[in-house]
Amino acid sequence: MKKWSRKYTKCIKCKRSDRKHKGHGLCENCFDKKRYKENPKVKEYRDKYRKNNRAKIRESQRRYHRRIKEELFNLLGNKCVKCGFADKRALQIDHINGGGCKELKLYSSKDYRRVVLKSLKNKENKYQLLCANCNWIKRDTNNELYKQPRKI
């Protein structure tokens, strides 16, 4: 197992080791919070940069999320498990045992993809790739619908 940092095994403030070490025994989040708290000019500069470079930042975020999605699809086989459909526009990540709606509520879409990626790398086998048709057929047959139909 890779050591978190030279002197520390985890962040001295939040006690987490799953984030990258940044400096002084702190993870990236704790280090940045401390830095912004101490120096308000840094926050001013950051806010000004974000305001002036919205398009550049957004494009960078899109590239990052496309890369994560591409990595997810590669790990899951790039095609529907049931019918073999391979058009990425209609492929969806599905929970093998159901319960995906409950888990999706816990995370934002960005965080959810990271959680799924981490799970796949740990070989937990909780997810599969299905085309939209197969996914909805599975949801209907297993009664996994998020909203139950209204009684008339």
Image (tube, helix red, strand yellow):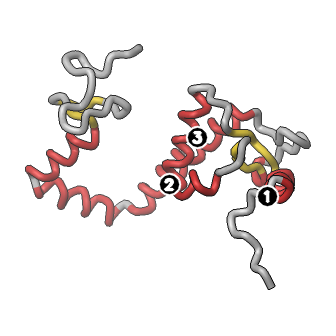
Q: Nearer the viewer, mark 3 or mark 2?
A: 2
Label 3 vs 2, first from the N-terminus: 2
Q: Residues within 10 Å of mark 1 (few under 14, many from 20)?
A: few
Judge depth for marks 1 and 2 and give the one in front: 1
Above or below for 18 versus 69: above
Find disc 2 in the rendering and name its residue.
106
Which quadrant of the rendered structure holds the N terminus? Answer: top left
The Cα atoms of the two marked residues, 1 and 3, are separated by 23 Å
Marks 3 and 2 in Cβ contact (< 8 Å): no
Instruction: Name the kind of residue labelled 1 in the image.
Output: Asn
Q: Nearer the viewer, residue 95 or 45?
A: 95
Q: CA distance from mark 1 to mark 2?
A: 21 Å
Q: Which mark is residue 92?
A: none
Q: Which mark is residue 143?
A: 1
Q: Quadrant of the C terminus?
A: bottom right
Task: Report which residue position mark 3 lands on.
Answer: 116
Is 138 on the left-hand or right-hand side of 110?
Answer: right
- Which amino acid is tagged 3? Val
Q: CA distance from mark 3 to mark 2?
A: 13 Å
Residue 57, percent from left and from top: 42, 55
Figure quadrant of residue 11: top left
Q: Quadrant of residue 102?
A: bottom right
Q: Earlier in the sequence, mark 1 or mark 2?
A: 2
> Mark 1, mark 3: which one is toward the viewer?
1
Between residue 55 and residue 74, name the one nearer to us: 74
